[in-house]
Image: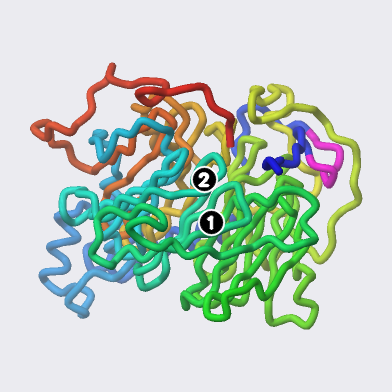
Amino acid sequence: MGWKRKTHHGGSCHQQQSCPSHGNELSAIDEEVSHLTRLKSEPCERTRASLHAGKKRHISTFKLLSGRESNCLGIGRFSSADCSYALRKHLPVKGPWCVDDMDSEAYISQFSADGSLLIGGFRGSHIRIYNAEKKWTIHKDITCKKLRWTVSDIALSPDQRYLAYSSLSPIVHMVDIQNGMRESHANITQVHEVLEFSNDDDGFSFAIFSVKFSKDGRELVVGNNNESICIYDIGSNKVTERIHAHSADVNAVTFADEGSDVLYSGSDDSLCKVWDRRCNKRGKQVGVLTGHLDGITFIDSRGDGHYFISNCKDQTIKLWDIRKMSSTVKDCTPKAYEWDYRWMTYPSEARYFKHPYDQSLSTFRGHSVLRTLIRCYFSPIHSTGQRYIYTGSSDQCVYIYDVATGKIVEKLRWHGSIIRDCSWHPYFPTLVSSSWDGYLVRWEATEDDKDPSMLKTGKQRMHPEGYTFSFVF
């Protein structure tokens, strides 16, 4: 049976009568979030006092280094906030430089937790793992089999030994990436273990959009077009929990923090939901967050068990605090507009609609979410104090927003097609973007004009070499 995606055109059935807001209005930034973000990404009061710097006065990197060397704080090193302040002024906006150039669309680019590896996933049957510490040489070249359409998502185990990859099918494959073999052809040179997620009750072809490892590496959680969240126990080799989570495709699912008990999910029904596996009613959400007007494409947790962000087909990113969630969903009302993000532009009259029961803390506008499930993330805590939110975009740019102000601080332009995914190195000022033009490229904080891999303006293309027309996901 061929794969079939449930189509939800435009606004959700949970949308109340939307109210237009002013066209140039930036949503108010929640004061608590702004304050907490500044605490993690700006010099503390002790640092400012020791350097005789006023509350709003800029402190140069030289002055910070001098203060550290003279041990002004009495701890012999930077505080984490001082470190973030020094590093976040050096954003990865120079370049780009080529990491790889493939003959099919690049869907995924993800750094490992320690930044030593970069994983690129491409339409069809190709995954490449690059060694970021050895000039982006190929660590593992994986050829997949029995995929439907593309690699839809990847997840790296916490010990960085196993890679799980999904496609628009009910199967997740798992492969050992540390066995010393550079070439991995599925079930020819290496076994790609099969994890089956469907059951006999599935009424149509099962497609997986999102996959994540638990923090202990013992479980996988997936979101799929069967409106459900499935949790797979790797040790017992079976699905142990199957939650009917939403009324439409579950495009995104992730763990809230270092534990494996709380989950966030996002769906084409426009809702974000929170799940706690410790509750007696494990198949019922503990909370719902309303505010988006269309399908949610991705969710990223801040990792503190409170805050997360969601990207959406209503052309916004929203920041949420689960302490403000409600226990039930509001009644359904008619949609305000009809459209399909896969081949239509977003209705101009709907661009600044606001949900009357919006529970989000902040809304970020400027990027474009069309044709594919575009992803967004918090910037790294080590180098930026999570000061920024960054996202791919269908207008061929990477957008970087300031969490404390809501403003766009940078737009990275070079690609010739949609940027579906991007990844900021957890420790260094390096960002990698993956585009439907077939390129994986990296952006740095400093320029190196002598590097032959630097890509010049005018070399862009709309499609990979050897491109043929394709369906969108």
Secondary element under disc 1, as helix, strand or loop, is strand
Do we see residue 404 in this rendering? Answer: no
Mark 2 lies on residue: 375
User: What amino acid type is highlighted by mark number 1?
Assistant: Asp
User: What amino acid type is highlighted by mark number 2?
Assistant: Arg
Give the total of numbered labels.
2
How far apart marks 2 and 1 lie (CA) works out to 9 Å
**Residue 378 in the image: x percent, y percent?**
46, 54
Which residue is at a point 43% across and 45% down the rendered structure image? 108
In the image, farthest residue toward the left = 450
Which residue is at a point 37% across and 56% down the rendered structure image? 188
Q: Quadrant of residue 353?
A: top right
Which residue is at a point 55% across and 68% down the rendered structure image? 220
Q: How is the image coloured?
A: rainbow
Frontmost residue, 333 versus 198:
198
* Image position of 315 (left or right of 405): right
Mark 1 lies on residue: 300
Q: Are dots 2 and 1 in contact, CB under 8 Å?
A: yes
**Residue 384 in the image: x percent, y percent?**
35, 56
Locate the C terminus and report the quarter of the image it occupies.
Answer: top right
Q: Residues within 10 Å of mark 1 (few under 14, many from 20)?
A: many
* Image position of 138 (left or right of 26): left
Which residue is at a point 40% across and 71% down the rendered structure image? 158
Do we see residue 18 in this rendering? Answer: yes
Locate the N terminus and report the quarter of the image it occupies.
Answer: top right
Frontmost residue, 356 versus 225:
225
Q: Is residue 366 above or below residue 1?
A: above
Mark closest to the chain's N terminus, 2 or 1: 1
Q: Is residue 17 magenta?
A: yes
Magenta highlight range:
12-19
